[in-house]
Image (tube, helix red, strand yellow):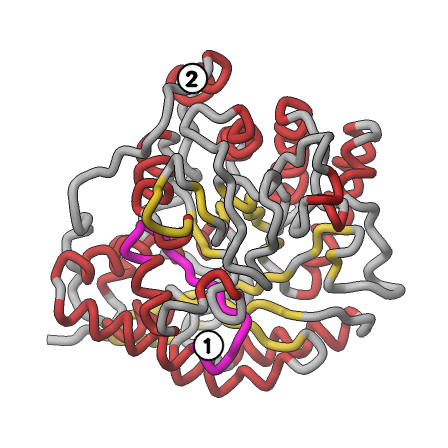
Amino acid sequence: MRQRVRWWSAGAGVAIVLAGLAVRSATDDGPPSTAAGASAPPSMSASVSSSPPSPPAVPACAGAVGRLSLGERAGQLLMVGTPVDRPRGLRAAVRRHHLGGVFLAGRSKRPAAALRADIAALQGDAAMPLLVALDQEGGSVQTLKGPDFPLIPSARRLGAGPKAVLRDTVRDNAGRLARVGVSVNLAPVADTVPAGLGEGNPPIGAFHREYGSDPVRVAEDVRTVVPASQGAGVLTILKHFPGLGRVRANTDTSTRAVDRTATVGDAYLEPFVAGIDAGSAGVMISSASYPRLDPEAIAAFSRPIVTGLLRDRFGYTGLIMSDDLGAAQAARAVPVGQRAVRFVRAGGDLVLTIRPQDAGPMTAALIAQARANPAFAARVDDAALHVLEAKQRAGLIRC
């Protein structure tokens, strides 16, 4: 018998009625993976083994997942892009596909009040409150600008200055985002770009998106950014795990982004460990290749990287999301729906696509695979749990 259960939005106090099914046991779809490579250096080993990251202090949402239909659970695993100047165009997709989140794409100088109204309209169409995300890093990557959203210095510039300035800048920006209804900033960039490469690194260095060339210093900045943003009400997403600082191609425009150096003992992982220790709500997986970690698949489709390294070795328990799997050239060889399936099978939770037209094929593929494979269905349940826990942590729902 299907039960009718009441959802409460913590922010608006609006009751939303959902019907659901009993939750499956959240088992994985295979044995734990072991990433290839050397042992971690002493500093990283200490970070991971002697001080494991603590999970967010929020109640478990397993029962809430069980009250969702399979279609609703599959929809929760998608974050879909919409133009920041015209976000209401995604309203039908929000309703039809039960989307877990929306990504505000592009650049805008719109007043805060106008954006707040648009976000509220999207939330009004969602049976469950949406995670609303954007790229507000600063420098060349700043979605919102104008009188209500002052220009933010680049990460490279902020990383070279006092920590107090970094903290206050991030806190002020997060407060402005939270007031218009943005709950997730796809930041900070935890990638380290070697000094000798600099702007020769197309995705990060060319735009001064990195905090520096020393992973120890970058880790210090990440430790500053995470609590500054989340303390002001906007969840952080560490990106782009396991690092884009050494590649010589951009995954958005090329299939040749490869880091042949990274191993499980890579010092360049230290900023990600620091962000995990600081309590970051999310980690974004890159779409580059890392042959010494997994010679078979890009990171977004790699179980050794997503589950073996991030989940098992680093003990990360929060939300794992993909980099764009829609328009990005790095994933173009894989059919659209299977991109979502492969990411979730690898251990990911929230699939990002900047293309609204991907919502249908991706949800359909997730549902079909879950119906055909009980182990994958359990993985969908587990992923949905991580999404709901992030929403609870953002203050959007109470499980």
Q: Amino acid at mark 2?
A: Ser
**Going 38% across and 64% down the picture, which residue do you hit?**
77
**What residue is drawn where x is 70% and y is 55%?**
136
Question: Left or right: where does residue 193 sit relative to residue 111?
Answer: left
- Seen at 79% across and 45% down, the residue is 154
Earlier along the polypeptide chain: callout 1 or callout 2? 2
- Magenta stretch encompasses residue 183: no
Reading the image, the residue beneath label 1 is 126
- Residues drawn in magenta: 344-358
Nearer the observer, 40 or 27: 40
Q: Tell which of 350 and 267 is nearer to you.
A: 267
Mark 1: amino acid:
Ala
Q: Is 347 included in the stretch rendered in magenta?
A: yes
Please state if 30 lies on the left or on the right of 51 as rendered: left
Looking at the picture, does residue 79 appear above or below residue 118?
Answer: above
Residue denoted by label 2: 45
Q: Is residue 240 left or right of residue 146?
A: left
| Quadrant of the rendering where the N terminus is positioned | bottom left
**Closer to the camera, 277 or 269?**
269
User: Whole-percent x and y of residue 373?
Assistant: 13, 64
Q: Determine crowd level at label 2: few under 14, some 14-19, many 20+ residues with C-alpha closer than 10 A.
A: some
Q: Is residue 370 above or below residue 203?
A: below
Looking at the image, the residue that sits furthest to the right is 147
